[in-house]
Every structure is written in C-alpha cells, then in structure tokens.
C-alpha cells in the first residue's frame, strides 16, 4: 500500500512539473535571476584584461578596481544611465562583429562608401594603423546572452572576432538559452535585453568550433526549462570556451596519457586518447592539454632528449599514433619508424 501511495504521489508530482506550451513558468523567474547574478559575480576577474559585451552594471561595478585593460561594448543592452564611466576603459555602442576598426573608422567607412559592396570591402580591409583591439590581446571575453541576441551572420562574425582577440590561455564566457527544437519568431526580455535567437543545444558546439573556439564546456543553470515557446523548451546554460589549437605542429617527442575516468575521449581536433595510453602529440597540443580546461586530465610525458622548438621537425597530426617508450628514453629517433597507429595497435589492420 505504501508503494502504491508513493507511485501516485510521484506521478502527480511529475504531472505538476510538466511544462505546458507557452508556459512562462513564473516559479522559475527568481531562480533564473539568482543564477544570472551568481554567474556575473563568478566571471569577473579584476586581474585579467577583459572585453565585456552587454555586461550588466553590477558586473561593471565589480570590475572597477581592475588592474588590467577593460573594453565595454553595448550591443543588445542600452548604455545604462546608472553606470559612471571608468577612466582608462574603452567604451563603444556597436555590434561586436568587427573589433579591428575603431568607432571613427567604422563611421568613415560607412559614410564614404557609395554602395553596400564598397562598404563591405572597406570594413574587411583592416585598419591602416593599430587595430582597436589587437589579436591575442584579451584574457577574457564575457558576453551574457550573445548567442541569443544576434542574427546568425552577425553571430558568426562576432564569435570569430572573440576568438581573434583572446590570448592563447584566454577564455570566452557567456550564458545561453538553448532550445531543444527549432524556435522561430520568439522574443524574450530578460534583465533589460531583448533575446530573439535561440540556437538548438545540438548546434552550439559546431557554432563555437566554426569560429575557432575549443575546449567548450556547458553547465546547466536551472534544473528545469526556463520557458517553453510553442512547445519548445528553453534551458539556461553557462558556457566557456578557449582557443589555442591553431598553429604549426612540431615534433618534440611529447606523449599525452589520458588519466580517466572515461575509457577514452576525443579533443576538438579529432585526436583520440584511450585511458592510460601514451599518444604521440605535437608541442602545441601538449601545451594546450596542460592549460584550462584540460589541465589535470592528462599526463604529458616528455622525451629525455627533447629538441629545442627551433630545431624541431614537423609533426603529422593527421594520424593518432602511440608513442614508443624507446623514443621517450632517447633510444630511437623521434622521426624514425616505430610509432603504431592507434587503430592498428591490436594487429587487426594491414598497414
């Protein structure tokens, strides 16, 4: 009898939690506001240079004592009247699609162009002098709801600019309302911003990877959907992403051993790492795996006679191969034979 009562109670509880079409879920409004407040507080790092896109005033105020450069862009959020400008900060009201040109250069390009094509050419040509925000110049980009506030083309260009300005150990941080199925013609106002674009959860990784970001991590902010729109559920996630996988692959005899807990993992470049197996990696990949967000998941084993990077030969990253122990110990040449492709380790192939 007790089990039957428990089953009835659980069924009624689930029925009460089930979202209805276009249900705004007022019970969740405070939870979302609290989660957003916590995200703002946790992402502010006053020791690192930052680009803040549509950051609320409380986030800007928390950064007033920053010891590094700060650039603020108002894109989907109105320039707040209750924010007092900080001396030394850069401010702009614009889309983050072009961070090379200053506001003045953008305006001159627009006013001088006699056609849309000329305008596009002028904007893509690059600034004559130093760029407004230089490449590899910014340690963190914080842009809440960037993926919800821009159209597809604008978003793609903006994310590429984010990847361009980030330092090799920098990170991009945002909050996104992601849909479980396509949602069109919806507009949600949250914290003073109008959100009109809702990418599907399954498309988020490809969107960020296409812009040159990697090491992408999502974290649910709520245990239930924030809202349903025409039957589609919107769930809130914080996301972080990094750069650093681009560049020349050079051979210094490094091996990366994945430490678990999964039986095997893949990185965003397609490299496979079975747990406990010494996979040969280039110097660039070895450095990436020792930085966030991978740090602590891999042991990097260096060759005893590791050559200087200036003398290193090219490394072929197109194949996943096991690093022989003899190469690590200096008993076999790094570029000689002996490395076994991972898919041939069991002797089941003809190569």
Image (spheres, helix red, strand yellow):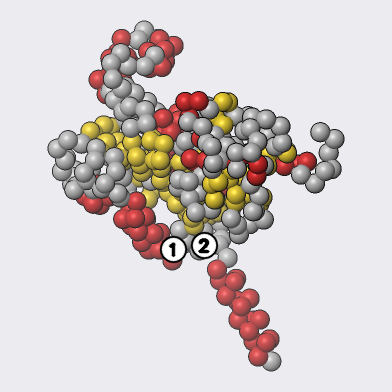
Residue 239 in percent (x, y) is at: 46, 48
Q: Is residue 258 above or below residue 153?
A: below
Vertically, is 15 above or below 279? below
Query: Would residue 126 be seen by someone viewing this image from the given angle?
Result: yes
Q: Residue furthest bottom?
A: 1
**Depth-wise, is mark 2 or mark 1 nearer the camera?**
2
User: Extreme front residue here?
Assistant: 331
Contact flag, marks 2 and 1 (Cβ < 8 Å): yes
Residue at image point 18% right, 48% down: 65
Q: Residue at x 37, y 28 (%)?
A: 135
160 in relation to 107, above or below: below
Asked if residue 77 lies left or right of residue 324, the reply is: left
Label 2 – label 1 distance at C-alpha: 8 Å
Asked which quadrant contains residue 344, the reply is top right
Secondary structure beneath dot 2 equals loop
Q: Which image quarter holds the N terminus?
A: bottom right
Q: Locate residue 350 relative to residue 199 in the image: left or right.
A: right
- Residue under numbered circle 2: 224
| Residue 283 x %, y % | 52, 35
Residue 150 position, x and y percent, is: 43, 36
- Residue plotted at (65% across, 41% down): 326
Locate the C terminus by quadrant. top right
Would residue 232 be seen by someone viewing this image from the given angle? Answer: no
Q: Which residue of the protein is positioned furthest toward the top in this rendering?
A: 114
Label 1 belongs to which residue? 28
| Front residue of 231 and 54 | 54
């Amino acid at each position: 009898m007790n089990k039957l009562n428990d089953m009835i109670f659980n069924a009624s509880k689930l029925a009460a939690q089930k979202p209805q079409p276009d249900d705004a879920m007022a019970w969740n409004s405070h939870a979302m506001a609290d989660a957003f407040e916590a995200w703002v507080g946790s992402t502010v790092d006053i020791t690192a240079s930052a680009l803040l896109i549509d950051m609320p005033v409380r986030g800007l105020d928390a950064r007033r004592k920053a010891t590094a450069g700060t650039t603020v862009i108002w894109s989907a959020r109105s320039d707040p009247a209750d924010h007092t400008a900080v001396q030394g900060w850069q401010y702009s009201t614009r889309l983050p699609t072009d961070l090379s040109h200053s506001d003045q250069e953008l305006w001159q390009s627009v006013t001088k162009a006699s056609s849309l094509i000329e305008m596009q050419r002028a904007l893509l040509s690059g600034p004559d002098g130093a760029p407004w925000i230089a490449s590899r110049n910014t340690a963190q980009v914080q842009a809440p709801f960037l993926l919800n506030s821009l159209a597809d083309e604008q978003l793609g260009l903006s994310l590429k600019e984010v990847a361009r300005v980030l330092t090799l150990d920098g990170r991009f941080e945002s909050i996104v309302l992601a849909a479980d199925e396509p949602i069109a013609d919806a507009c949600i106002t949250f914290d003073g911003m109008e959100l009109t674009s809702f990418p599907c959860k399954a498309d988020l990784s490809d969107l960020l990877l296409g812009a040159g970001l990697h090491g992408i991590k999502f974290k649910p902010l709520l245990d239930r959907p924030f809202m349903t729109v025409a039957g589609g559920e919107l769930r809130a996630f914080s996301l972080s992403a990094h750069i650093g996988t681009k560049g020349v692959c050079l051979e210094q005899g490094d091996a990366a051993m994945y430490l678990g807990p999964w039986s095997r993992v893949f990185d965003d470049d397609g490299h496979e790492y079975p747990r406990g197996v010494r996979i040969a990696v280039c110097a660039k990949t070895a450095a990436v795996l020792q930085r966030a967000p991978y740090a602590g998941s891999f042991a990097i084993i260096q060759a005893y006679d590791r050559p200087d990077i200036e003398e290193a030969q090219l490394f072929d990253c197109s194949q996943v191969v096991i690093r022989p122990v003899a190469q690590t110990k200096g008993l076999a040449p790094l570029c000689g034979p002996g490395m076994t492709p991972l898919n041939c380790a069991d002797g089941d192939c003809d190569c």
